[in-house]
């Protein structure tokens, strides 16, 4: 597993990380024992950065992760997030009181006294990012968190945050399925010495060896509300994905391996953050950090999946509230 810096002069971690949202049924039922086995296998493969949030399963992901951390805390670079309330009247809260209360709750559920990387999960509209940075930096100075992260922000917000203090990482959806970060965020992270943690690097399963069947999505599957999976858009997206799968097979790779190798080619500041409870899938994901693609191969991928190829927006109306728009 190749390693990359978690921010300028930050800790070196595996270029592929592990997201834990899938462990609490976001894409269907999850098995606790299978999830814990997946964590152990990931650690042995060099996937040593585990990412969670206080809203994944309303804290259940953190509680599950705490079971693994009891015996492996010294080997795991731990990240969690705050700022989403699940309150429809006030879905995002970045106040100092809420952030501190959220952090204390996460520390308790995780069974730790320190979180290595703590993210603002969503930036509350109308609250200056400078004020939020002040809050996070106070928590860092108290020793309760290590590095500071931001999620789903615009490049301009990152620029303002960096004027206040160091930001180690920014999370954003980024893959061959969703390339908006190329319109400024990838570049801003490179300039600022900030790691870009690309979540959903296999496109919420579209680059799996077996293509998803949207009509079979179970109750609670997050993808049911995503326009790219509705019948009309999916029928248009499917031929592109089939062509990419065929090219991956020609190269001797799984589609997920090739998709992550492509992502990691975007720059040394880019890291992949897939979420999976499947050991087999995580092996494919981790393999993406072991291969380098030639200029010819990258050009062929671009020809198969040109920028903007995906039909439909990545989020529906409800989920689009929170991520900052730009460009």
Image: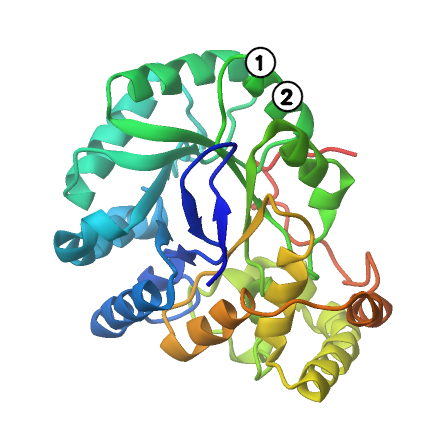
Q: Which colour style is shown? A: rainbow
Instruction: Judge by depth and name the residue closer to the eye, 35 or 227.
Output: 35
C-alpha span from label 1 to label 2: 7 Å
Secondary structure of the residue carrying tag 2 is: helix
The quadrant the C terminus occupies is top right
Q: Which picture quadrant has residue 304?
A: bottom right
- Near mark 1 (Cα within 10 A), the count class, few <14, some 14-19 or many ≥20, is few
Q: Are marks 1 and 2 in contact (CB under 8 Å)?
A: yes
Q: Is residue 14 above or below residue 78?
A: below
Task: Name the side, left or right, on which 222 lies relative to 111.
Answer: right
Q: Is residue 111 above or below residue 90?
A: below
Residue 207 visible to an observer of this rendering: no
Q: Mark 2 = which residue?
A: 159
Instruction: Judge by depth and name the residue closer to the eye, 261 or 30.
Output: 261
At which x and y percent is residue 165? 49, 16
At which x and y percent is residue 204? 56, 64
Q: Mark 1 = which residue?
A: 163
Residue at position x 44%, y 66% in the image: 27
At which x and y percent is residue 114? 22, 33
Residue at position x 75%, y 77% in the image: 235
Q: Which picture quadrant has residue 55?
A: top left
Task: Name the side, left or right, on which 42 lies relative to 187.
Answer: left
Residue at position x 57%, y 84% in the image: 210
Residue 283 visible to an observer of this rendering: yes
Secondary structure of the residue carrying tag 1 is: loop
Task: Name the side, left or right, on which 91 lies relative to 44.
Answer: right
Task: Name the side, left or right, on which 13 lies relative to 303.
Answer: left
At which x and y percent is residue 17? 43, 56
Which numbered dot is residue 295? none
Residue at position x 58%, y 60% in the image: 201
Query: In the rendered picture of this protein, how many numbered marks are placed on residues?
Result: 2
């Amino acid at each position: 597993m190749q390693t990359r810096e978690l921010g300028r002069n930050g800790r070196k971690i595996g270029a592929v990380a592990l997201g834990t949202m899938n462990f609490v049924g976001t894409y269907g039922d999850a098995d606790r024992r299978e999830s814990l086995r997946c964590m152990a296998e990931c650690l042995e493969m060099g996937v040593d950065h585990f990412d969670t949030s206080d809203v994944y399963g309303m804290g259940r992901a953190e509680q599950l992760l705490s079971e693994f951390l009891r015996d492996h805390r010294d080997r795991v670079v731990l990240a969690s997030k705050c700022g989403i309330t699940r309150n429809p009247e006030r879905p995002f809260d970045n106040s100092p009181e809420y952030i501190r209360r959220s952090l204390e709750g996460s520390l308790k559920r995780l069974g730790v006294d320190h979180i290595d990387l703590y993210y603002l999960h969503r930036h509350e509209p109308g609250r200056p990012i400078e004020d939020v940075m002040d809050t996070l930096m106070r928590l860092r100075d108290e020793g309760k968190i290590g590095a500071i992260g931001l999620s789903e922000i615009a490049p301009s917000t990152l620029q303002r945050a960096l004027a206040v203090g160091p930001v180690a990482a920014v999370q954003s959806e980024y893959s061959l399925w969703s390339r908006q970060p190329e319109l400024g965020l990838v570049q801003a992270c490179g300039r600022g010495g900030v790691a870009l943690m690309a979540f959903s690097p296999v496109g919420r399963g579209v680059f799996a060896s077996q293509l998803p069947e949207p009509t079979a999505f179970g109750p609670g599957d997050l993808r049911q509300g995503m326009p790219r999976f509705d019948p009309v858009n999916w029928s248009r997206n499917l031929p592109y994905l089939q062509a990419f799968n065929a090219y991956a097979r020609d190269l001797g790779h799984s589609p997920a391996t090739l998709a992550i190798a492509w992502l990691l080619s975007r720059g040394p500041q880019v890291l992949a953050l897939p979420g999976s409870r499947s050991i087999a899938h995580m092996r494919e994901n981790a393999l993406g950090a072991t291969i380098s693609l030639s200029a010819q191969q990258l050009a062929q991928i671009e020809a198969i999946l040109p920028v903007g190829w995906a039909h439909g927006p990545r989020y529906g109306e409800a989920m689009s509230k929170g991520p900052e728009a730009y460009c």
